[in-house]
Amino acid sequence: MQRTHHASAAVSGVLYAEDFDAPPAQVARSTGRTAPVPEPEVIIPTYSVAELHAATVRAREEGRQLERTEAAAANAARSGAALTELAGQVAETQQQAAAAVDKALHALAGTTLSLLAAAVPDLCRRHAAAELQALMRRVLPPLRQVPSLSIRLHPAMRPALQEQVATLLLDAGTDVTWIESATFAAGDIAVTWQNGCALRDTASIGAAIRDAVLSLLVPETTELVEMNDDQ
């Protein structure tokens, strides 16, 4: 009778005291309802005041350290960019300075060569007679034994040398042939005998002076000022 009563009670939805002792699944079967799923128990963590303070201090320090790291990285980036820009400016300045020095050296060399180009031929003409007489005093005494020789020079120089040559070759029996050449500069002379010759070329003197100046001023200068004896 009790089971029948319970069965009828389950059908009618009425629960009795013994039903509360039954497992949820049995109750659900007896009542015809789905048993609710129990929610998990939430355990709220608890921290002491000291722990919270330490965590706050640590978080604040980590934040400051992160700020310092980011600031240092930004400063390094700015410093690197500034150094790169400065290096470029220094390199450009060095190139400009080198170009200016090179230009100044070329200008100085050009000016110096222009002055020499005008001065050397004039000096050669002005001192031609004295220079040629000095050359004759060195060349002719050893040639007193040769049978003949020729002297080629500018026409204006013959009067200054003719008497000196006659004196230096006196009683030597050497036959002297004078050849006047208008193509010779005033300071040029060529003494020729059977086995050799002695030359004085003012153009070569000017070229030697020019090369010496260039080697001191601008060793690689390509623009040269020719020293022409006709200037």
Image (cartoon, helix red, strand yellow):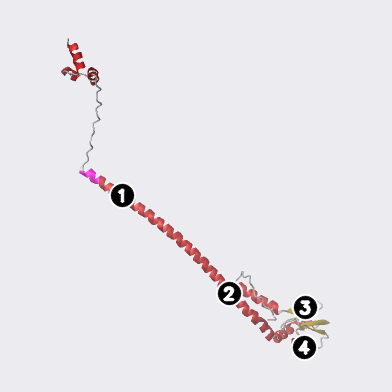
Q: Amino acid at mark 2?
A: Ala
Q: Quadrant of the N terminus?
A: top left
Sooner in the amino-acid sequence: mark 2 or mark 1: 1
Q: Residue furthest front?
A: 12
| Residue on which the image places disc 2 | 107
Q: Amino acid at mark 3?
A: Cys
Provide residue 69's location: percent of width, then percent of height: 35, 52
Q: Amino acid at mark 4?
A: Gln
Q: Quadrant of the C terminus?
A: bottom right
Frontmost residue, 76 versus 133: 76
> Whole-Å distance between the Cαs marked 3 and 2?
40 Å
Identify whether 17 is placed above or below 73: above
Q: Quadrant of residue 42?
A: top left
Provide residue 120's location: percent of width, then percent of height: 66, 81
Sooner in the amino-acid sequence: mark 1 or mark 4: 1
In the picture, measured across the screen, residue 110 lies left or right of residue 185, that is: left
**Mark 1 and 3 residues: CB-CB less than 8 Å, in contact?**
no
Sooner in the amino-acid sequence: mark 1 or mark 3: 1
Observer-side mark, 2 or 4, equals 2
| Residue on which the image places disc 1 | 63
> Whole-Å distance between the Cαs marked 2 and 4?
45 Å
Provide residue 131's location: percent of width, then percent of height: 70, 84
> Whole-Å distance between the Cαs marked 1 and 3?
98 Å
| Residue on which the image places disc 4 | 162
Please identify the dominant SS of the magenta region.
Answer: helix
Q: Residue at x 38, y 53 (%)?
A: 73
Observer-side mark, 3 or 2, equals 2
Residues in magenta, as a range: 49-54
> Whole-Å distance between the Cαs marked 1 and 4?
108 Å
Crowding at dot 1, Cα within 10 Å, few <14 / some 14-19 / many 20+, comes out as: few
- Does the segment drawn in magenta span residue 52? yes
